[in-house]
Amino acid sequence: MREDFLHFLWRWRRFDARDLYCTDGQVLEILHPGEPNPHAGPDFFNARIRLNETLWAGNVEIHLNASDWLAHRHDEDPAYDNVVLHVVLDEDRRLCRRSGEPLPCLVLRPRIPPQLLDKYLRLEHERAWIPCEKTYGLVPEIVRHNWLDRLLVERLEQKTEAVRQAVEASGQHWEEAFYRLLARNFGLKINTEPFEALARSLPLRVLARHKDQLFQLEALLFGQAGLLEGGFADEYPQALAKEYRFLQQKYALVPLEGSQWKFFRLRPSGFPTLRLAQLAALIHRSSQLFSVLLASWNTAETEALFQVETSAYWQTHFRFDKSTDKRTKPLGREFVHLLLINTVAPVLFHYGNAKGQPDLQDRALRLLEELPPESNTIVDNWSALGQRAAHAAQSQALLQLKMHYCDARRCLECAIGNAILR
């Protein structure tokens, strides 16, 4: 048993609360369990209890064993002087406050409903894909639907923290922050870090000066990425390298190490060389892409902003000096959807919050509801359990549920877990 189960029991009063007594014989009445404390200090703040005829207001600390109070050195910490009740599974030791007064203690073990404990232990020890795999389908659909709605907002709030950091790092320059976040997501999981490092080392203001010349944009991006080093057989990369050397001196640029870019196990359509060419084409269309996005009216118009074609060379190449018989495609629709989900929606959501424009937050949510669900292993596994995602908003919520609750075994903090434990 974990301590969080005792937190769950105490917070929701899911134990037998009839005829309560502390271990010192005092009659206990719980008027309010207090508010959970997610930070350092006692587990619950501002609880209200009655001991015999005396009303107490203060904090509650919870442990599996009473001796954990000493093991965690609470007896030396003044932050615990206002604890009015110690709630434990077992009292293996009588304790006192720092003042020497006895610390009232409530033992929960004999008060836990056996059926509830059995359900909890089954969730705790289940080693299926998700702990509640066998009982998930028994949870009422309204409970699951409402919880997924909440998880979508939670996921957006988590993603907007990265947006907030990007805006702060760029000196409150929203276009620069959007460019950095967009570049990062061009790398997906494999080349995320190199793309982000590239965007940080090559400011948008530099690219904006050359936005009308796709050739120069490619020279800057490929050169700064460290991918124009060495000799080339084709004239095009030779010309790019020459142009980059000129621009490098002009802007005092220090290129990245080209060795950090990963090609292994990637499909050619996902090679970082082709992605860089696509990013250049996108900036060529507009170096003020975030402003254009703010002005777009609907999802179709937003999606159309990313429908760009690369320069002629990259329509027949995936890498330098290696031509292909297959014509390369522009930014694929599925990839564009990932950019909208992982970049556009979180930035719109955070911008709406920062600027006091809730309509933009609603637009971010609507964008996700109008995009198809993502296609990945997690979403597919949910579908196999009967939880099919109708759109990207639901697939994002399901990703949040699996990665931040199921995998972390946070069943007691999950509305679905709570429903199973009823």
Image (spheres, rainbow, N blue to C red):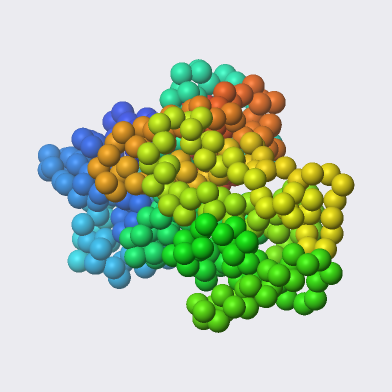
Most extreme residue toward the right is 325
- 92 and 190: which is toward the camera: 190
- Residue 203's place in the image compared with 410, above or below, is below
The residue under the point 61% across, 24% down is: 388
Residue 266 in the figure: left or right of residue 409: right
| Count of picture labels | 0
- 299 and 20: which is toward the camera: 299
The residue under the point 52% across, 57% down is: 212
- Residue 14's place in the image compared with 326, above or below, is above
Q: Position of residue 328 (x, y in %)?
A: 76, 45
Most extreme residue toward the left is 54
Residue 234 in the figure: left or right of residue 54: right
Can you see residue 118?
no
Q: Quadrant of residue 19?
A: top left
Q: Position of residue 195 (x, y in %)?
A: 59, 61
- 190 and 305: which is toward the camera: 305
Q: Quadrant of residue 398?
A: top right
Q: Position of residue 201 (x, y in %)?
A: 52, 71
Can you see residue 249?
yes
- Residue 99's place in the image compared with 277, above or below, is below
Q: Position of residue 125 (x, y in %)?
A: 63, 40
Residue 256 in the figure: left or right of residue 237: left
Residue 310 in the figure: left or right of residue 351: right
The residue under the point 35% across, 51% down is: 38
- 176 and 74: which is toward the camera: 176
The residue under the point 20% across, 66% down is: 99
Q: Quadrant of residue 229?
A: bottom right
